[in-house]
Image (cartoon, grey):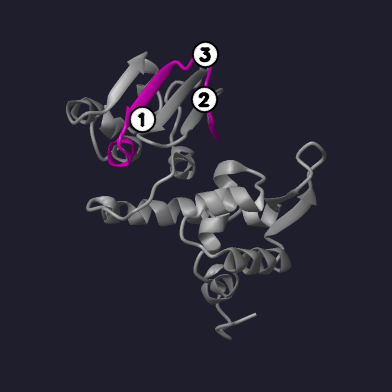
Amino acid sequence: MRTYGQFCGIAKALDLVGDRWTLLIVRELLALGPCRHTDLRNGLPGIASNLLVERLRELEQAGLIQREAAPPPVATTLFSLTDRGLELESVLQELGRWGLPLLHEPLATDSFRTHWLAVPARRLVDHTPDRPPVLLQLHADGNEDLVIEVIGGAVHTHPGRADSPSAALTGTPELLTAVLSGELDLAEAQDQGLRLDGDPDALLRVLPRTAH
């Protein structure tokens, strides 16, 4: 293992997760849960297959991920985060928050997957936790859907579609990200093309107050 050789928590952490692609692999496993190699490749456009194998091996040796054989009919290897790996969610939350200003001028070549919104979406706060559960569905043009479940004051996410979402948002990655982060008012986002179907109050229940 490459090391900075410094007696410093930051340096020691970067010894394990500072290599290119490593934290993005953690992002995928946080957003999707247990994943096949193919799932990870699909969520990491641009990574070489052999490099992904190498990074997974390094993360496993570091005790941050584990592998298990999925039972039939899947019958393949699944990768998931260990408890130690799950502790990186707060790190990625803060890193994503810090990086928000860098999204103001996206490149035309930037790729996007809707489930990348899962980790920042889990920063949302249920402002009225005593109300009944709601399901929110996000759809970015040309991508898969992401479901945000709000129940008992907790916010959970999973990829896929909800049968009967309380509210659904459809728009560009830029608009969805801006609304979920509170950088753009919902009404203003709608003026710019964001589509809201269903109950607006269900969505406003979790949006940052500045986005109301």
Q: What is the secondary structure assignment of the residue under circle 2?
A: loop
CA gap between label 3 and label 1 equals: 17 Å
- N-term-proximal mark, 1 vs 2: 2
The answer to whether marks 2 and 3 mark residues whose Cβ atoms lie closer than 8 Å is no
Which residue position is annotated with label 2? Answer: 161
- N-term-proximal mark, 3 vs 1: 3
- Looking at the rendered image, the disc whose residue lies closer to the viewer, 1 or 2, is 2
126 horizontally vs 196: left or right: right
Q: Where is residue 39 in the image (x, y as percent from the top left)?
A: 60, 47
Magenta region, residue range: 155-176
Q: Nearer the viewer, residue 73 or 101?
A: 73
Relative to residue 43, is residue 51 depicted above or below? below
Q: Position of residue 46 (x, y in %)?
A: 46, 60
Which residue position is annotated with label 3? Answer: 132
Three-letter code for the amino acid on which mark 3 is drawn: Pro
Q: Position of residue 150 (x, y in %)?
A: 51, 25
Numbered circles on residues, count: 3
CA gap between label 2 and label 3 equals: 20 Å
For label 1, count other residues whose C-alpha is less than 10 Å away and answer few (under 14), some (14-19) or many (20+): many
Q: Nearer the viewer, residue 105 or 125?
A: 105
Three-letter code for the amino acid on which mark 1 is drawn: Leu
CA gap between label 1 and label 2 equals: 20 Å
Relative to residue 11, is residue 150 depicted above or below? above
Q: Nearer the viewer, residue 79 or 63?
A: 79
| Residue at the (58%, 75%) spot, across then down | 15
The quadrant in which residue 62 appears is bottom right
Q: Where is residue 158 in the image (x, y as percent from the top left)?
A: 55, 34
For label 3, count other residues whose C-alpha is less than 10 Å away and answer few (under 14), some (14-19) or many (20+): few
